[in-house]
Every structure is written in C-alpha cells, then in structure tokens.
C-alpha cells in the first residue's frame, strides 16, 4: 500500500491510497466465493457458475463493490497509522480507480488536528464564587426532607389548596361523553394544574360525598382536535379528601432520616454536605471560566468535518445512554418533537466548545511538559476495575496499547485543567446595581 497526502485549506487533507493489484484480485476472488452460491445461470448448478461466466454476463465490475468495501477499511486504517498528521474526522471516501489487473486507488478527505497558538493561560482572572452556606439553604434542605417523609392523611373537611382529592369523574361535550374523559378513584393534587383550565379550583370548598359539576374549556391547541377550544362539563364525585402532614422538625425526625441522634447534629451534617457540594461546583465553574478565557485568547482554525464528527459522536453517546434506560433515539425524538438531524444541529455549539477545550488543554500540556505517569495510569486502571468489577490485569489486557495511549492523553489533559485552574487569579464579583441606580 502507498499513501500520498495533499494538504487542503482549513486544516483539511486528501489522502490518496493505492492498494496493489494482487490484493484487489484477491478481494474480487473472495467476493466471488462469497456470492457464487446466490447466483443461478441456466446450465450450471447453483454455486458452480465460473467467475468468468458471471463477469461475461454481468460485466467485470460485478464484484467490484464488494471487493472495494472489503479493502477500504484496512487500507484506510494503515494509511492513518502512516500519516504524520493526526486525523480528527471520519473520512469522506471516493474510489478513483478499480479495474482488474491494476492497483486499486481511492481517496479519503479528512480533517487534520489544528495547530493551536496559545495566548495567556497562566494567571487568568476569573470571578470568585461564594461558597458560603446560608441558614436558609440548610432549612430548605431540611424542609425537602420533611416533604420526602410526609404522609397523606384522610380528613373530614372541605377540599383546600394543596390537598389530594380522590374522585370519580366523567366529561361531556354537548351532553355527549367523550373518549378518555372518564376516571375512577383518581387522586388529584389540588394546585398541581394537572387538569385543564380551572378544574381543580372548582373542587375547593367541596366535601367528600358531594357531587360537583365542573365547567371548563379545552385549550385551542389541545392534542385531541375534536375537543380543542370546546366547553365541557365534568360530573365529579368526591370520594375522599386527604391532606399532606409533615413530620415535626425534632430529634426524633433527625434520628429517623439520618445517622444522627439530634436535630442539631443532622443540621450540621447538612451544612457540611452543602458546603462540599458548593466547593465542587465552584471548582468546576472556575475551571470552565478559565478554559473559556484561554479559548478566547487562543488562535486555531477548526475544520467543519471535525465538528461534524464530534456532533455525531455526542449523539451516539446519548443514544447509548438512552438504551441503558430502556429507550431508543427514535422514541426520544417522538417525545421531544425533534429529529436526529435537528438534534445533531442543536448540539453544534457544545461540540465546538468541547473541541476547543480539548485543543487548548493539550496545547497547555505540551507547553508545560505535563504528562501522565505510569503511577497515574495504574490508579486509573484500579478505578476502572472497581467500576466494572473486573481484575485490573484483565482491564489492561482488554485495553491494549491503543487504549493505554488514549488514557494517558486524557490524564495529561486533566492535569493541564488542574494546572490552569490552580494558576488562575480570583477577583471579587462585581456587586449588582440596585434597580433604582439602573
């Protein structure tokens, strides 16, 4: 195999890859052997038709497509290994010569990794983020725990906002019941606005055992077109009224929902955890701000093909996460009203930012001679082994040298991110002007 590289504009390149004629002949023969059992010609038993006969009847190019599809992946992979530049996109392949007795030639248009000229990357100024935990935040967390541990209790009084009314109902338009308008023993949270119009408000003040006629109007954009914009009457029977009861905030509550015996200890633990979370969030936000500032100072020309490849990779990763949740991309698109194409387009800014961040951090790592050590690699393998519940040696074996190289690069980039964050300068955030001043 031979390779020629032609540099194009905007960090693109055309690879011209030539495969020897004998390899093409072997691929054509393999394609014939694979397909001969599917071809029937009068006078020959199935699978016994000579290759020359097939080529005479259907043309010499009959097996070319299968042969090309067999040759291109391996030849392209070898070309990538031989290429001195780093290829950062999927190839756009075009066959330029395929003919028996001659070399097989095809081209692959690819994006090359852009060169990055760094601006300022040490001592970058970013706003300091306040990580103080207020009493209000601790109380909010406590109240959420009360909500999580609340219980619904049947009460002998009229329906009030915030209650749950257990109802039977049936809806009518022009005195005719409509499909989907009936329910029994339905628990309706008053104030949730889960029913149309002012349905829930009309139950307030009514008691269990009462029958109520609720008058509503369907929205103009209602999903069932035959009901859109029409007035309707729901005949409702209130069967039960329930109110939410929250546990008292005391030592007993703390001992039931935590490992602490007193409310004071529990609150202190909440404050500590909120503080740890704020510190981590601030660290991440600082890193993002620093990298964004470095990107703004850097110079790089990112080819469109590189962005498109990143977009497809992000969508593929998202599709895999959906599968783990029992959903596929088509179902997700139906629920959200998107298409795969619109989804790819919508994540373009994220894809660009991800590429820019990686490139500048790789440039920082090179400038500062930041590298991952074998010890760093071993620690990462131990984490992966624990995550996958495998032996560390088995993880190394599966990963191979290519996988190790990728992890070492990722670790170096992570170290570069730590470096720029730790070398950044924090300044106080500007005080917000009062509305009167504005």
Image (cartoon, helix red, strand yellow):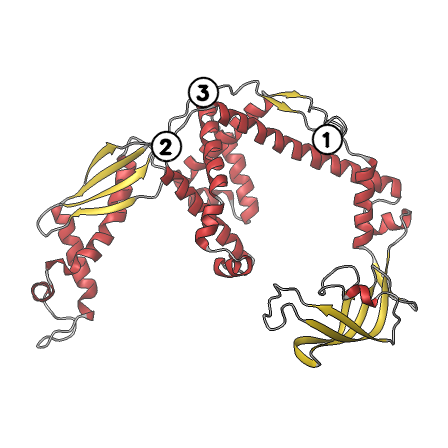
The reply to whether callout 1 and callout 2 are in contact (CB within 8 Å) is no
Q: Assess disc 3: are there few (<14), some (14-19) or many (≥20) residues with their C-alpha within 10 Å of its C-alpha.
A: few
Instruction: Say which label, 1 or 3, has the lower sequence index.
Output: 1
Secondary structure under tag 1 reads loop
In the displayed structure image, the side of residue 116 where residue 69 appears, left or right: left
Residue at image position (36%, 37%) is 88
What's the mark number on residue 113? 2
Q: Where is residue 161 in the image (x, y as percent from the top left)?
A: 84, 60
Q: Where is residue 29 in the image (x, y as percent from the top left)?
A: 15, 58
Vertical comparison of 215 with 141: above or below: below
The reply to whether callout 1 and callout 3 are in contact (CB within 8 Å) is no
Instruction: Say which label, 1 or 2, has the lower sequence index.
Output: 2
Label 1, on which residue? 131
Q: How far apart are marks 1 and 3 (CA)?
A: 32 Å
Location of residue 113 by image quarter = top left
Q: Position of residue 318 (x, y in %)?
A: 50, 50
Residue at image position (10%, 75%) is 44
In the image, 173 versus 419, the foreground residue is 173
Q: Assess disc 1: are there few (<14), some (14-19) or many (≥20) residues with their C-alpha within 10 Å of its C-alpha.
A: some
Q: Quadrant of the N terminus?
A: top left
Label 3, on which residue? 367
In the displayed structure image, the side of residue 357 where residue 114 appears, left or right: left
Secondary structure under tag 3 reads helix
Q: Where is residue 91 in the image (x, y as percent from the top left)?
A: 31, 43
């Amino acid at each position: 195999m031979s390779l020629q590289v032609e540099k194009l504009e905007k960090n693109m390149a055309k690879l011209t890859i030539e495969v020897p004629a004998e390899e093409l002949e072997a691929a054509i023969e393999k394609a014939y052997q694979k397909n001969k059992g599917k071809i029937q010609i009068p006078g020959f038993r199935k699978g016994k038709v000579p290759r020359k006969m097939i080529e005479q009847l259907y043309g010499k190019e009959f097996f070319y497509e299968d042969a090309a599809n067999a040759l291109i992946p391996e030849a392209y992979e070898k070309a990538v290994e031989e290429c001195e530049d780093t290829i950062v996109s999927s190839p756009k392949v075009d066959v330029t010569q395929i003919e028996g007795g001659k070399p097989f030639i095809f081209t692959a248009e690819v994006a090359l990794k852009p060169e990055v000229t760094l601006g300022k990357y040490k001592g970058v100024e970013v706003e300091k983020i306040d990580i103080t935990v207020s009493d209000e935040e601790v109380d909010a967390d406590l109240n959420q725990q009360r909500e999580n541990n609340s219980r619904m209790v049947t009460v002998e009084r009229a329906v009030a906002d915030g209650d749950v009314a257990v109802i039977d109902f049936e809806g009518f338009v022009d005195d005719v019941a409509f499909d989907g308008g009936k329910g029994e023993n339905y628990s309706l949270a008053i104030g949730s606005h889960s029913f149309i119009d002012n349905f829930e408000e009309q139950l307030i003040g009514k008691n269990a055992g009462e029958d109520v006629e609720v008058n509503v109007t369907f929205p103009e954009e209602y999903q069932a077109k035959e009901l859109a914009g029409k007035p309707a009457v729901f005949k409702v029977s209130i069967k039960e009224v329930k109110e939410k009861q929250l546990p008292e905030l005391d030592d007993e509550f703390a001992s039931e929902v935590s490992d602490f015996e007193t409310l004071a200890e529990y609150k202190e633990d909440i404050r500590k955890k909120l503080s740890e979370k704020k510190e981590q969030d601030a660290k991440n936000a600082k890193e993002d701000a620093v990298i964004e500032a470095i990107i703004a100072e850097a110079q790089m020309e990112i080819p469109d093909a590189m962005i498109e490849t990143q977009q497809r990779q992000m969508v593929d990763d998202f599709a895999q996460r959906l599968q783990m949740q029992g959903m596929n991309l088509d179902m997700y698109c139906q629920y959200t009203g998107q298409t795969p194409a619109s989804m790819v387009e919508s994540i373009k800014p994220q894809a660009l930012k991800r590429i820019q961040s990686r490139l500048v951090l790789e440039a920082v790592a090179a400038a500062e001679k930041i590298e991952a050590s074998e010890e760093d690699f071993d620690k990462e393998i131990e984490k992966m082994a624990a995550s996958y519940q495998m032996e560390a040696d088995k993880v190394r074996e599966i990963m191979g040298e290519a996988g190790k190289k990728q992890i070492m690069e990722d670790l170096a980039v992570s170290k570069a991110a730590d470096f720029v964050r730790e070398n950044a300068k924090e300044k106080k955030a500007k005080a917000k002007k009062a509305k009167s001043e504005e």
